[in-house]
Amino acid sequence: FPEIAFSGRSNVGKSSMINKLLNRNKLARTSSQPGRTQSINFFNIDDRFVLVDLPGYGFAKVPLKVKKEWGRLIDDYLYNRTNLVGIVQIIDARHKPTKDDLMMVNWLKDTGIPTIIAATKVDKLKKSQQSKQKKLIRETLQLAEDMDFCFFSAKTGEGKDQIFNFIVDLIEG
Ligand code: GDP
């Protein structure tokens, strides 16, 4: 099945996003399957596609060895999974993207895998702050004009449709 992977730094809201996407759309019988590695989780959605929960990056105080292992895990996954059709790259809507976010996005640009940037926790932003944040994010990550971008909230469900449209386009195209 085609795979869509979710990537973001730890605590950014990745689990909440995946849960929101799964629950609200009543995509029956999601099951966590044992992956090829310990820390990548696979959710089979109705035998149509698979959501891949990549381990979060950017943990502040882990030894370099662990960071390197994380890097190798993600690298192996991104380069070797032939079924991978797209990435949902999650960042925090409230903050300037971190160095790790930038590194990850540059990595994704290099691989050429279709990506949507999902800025989550937008419910914590005032409406009046949104366009300024969007601009900051686009500039910091040096996003091309045609790069998909959406605001998301696991609280309100905002942005859910955009992410689903991104996924549907990938699995039907
Ligand atoms: P993960 O480590 O990336 O999987 O992050 P989690 O999904 O566990 O979320 C980390 C924290 O952020 C939790 O306390 C969540 O309740 C909170 N959170 C996640 N998404 C949202 C959101 O869209 N809005 C708000 N207000 N809080 C969120």
Image (spheres, helix red, strand yellow):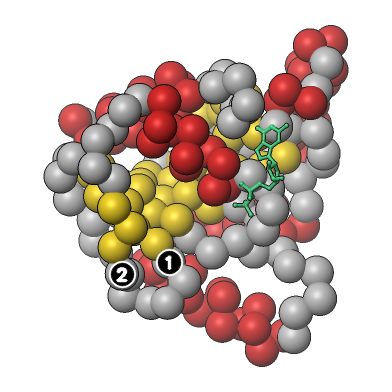
The tag earlier along the polypeptide, 1 or 2, is: 2
3D distance between C-alphas at marks 1 and 2: 8 Å
- Left/right of residue 67 with respect to residue 131 in the rendered view: left
- Left/right of residue 19 with respect to residue 170 in the rendered view: right
- The residue sitting at 47% across, 40% down in the picture is 19
- Left/right of residue 106 with respect to residue 98 in the rendered view: left
Question: 28 and 21: which one is in front?
Answer: 28
Q: Secondary structure at mark 2?
A: loop
Give the residue at mark 2.
Answer: 34
| x then y, percent, for residue 135 | 76, 25
Give the residue at mark 1.
Answer: 40
- The residue sitting at 48% across, 49% down in the picture is 6
| x then y, percent, for residue 83 | 23, 56
Question: 47 and 23: which one is in front?
Answer: 23
Q: What amino acid type is highlighted by mark number 2?
A: Pro
Quadrant of ligand 1 in image:
top right
Mark 1 vs mark 2: in front: 2
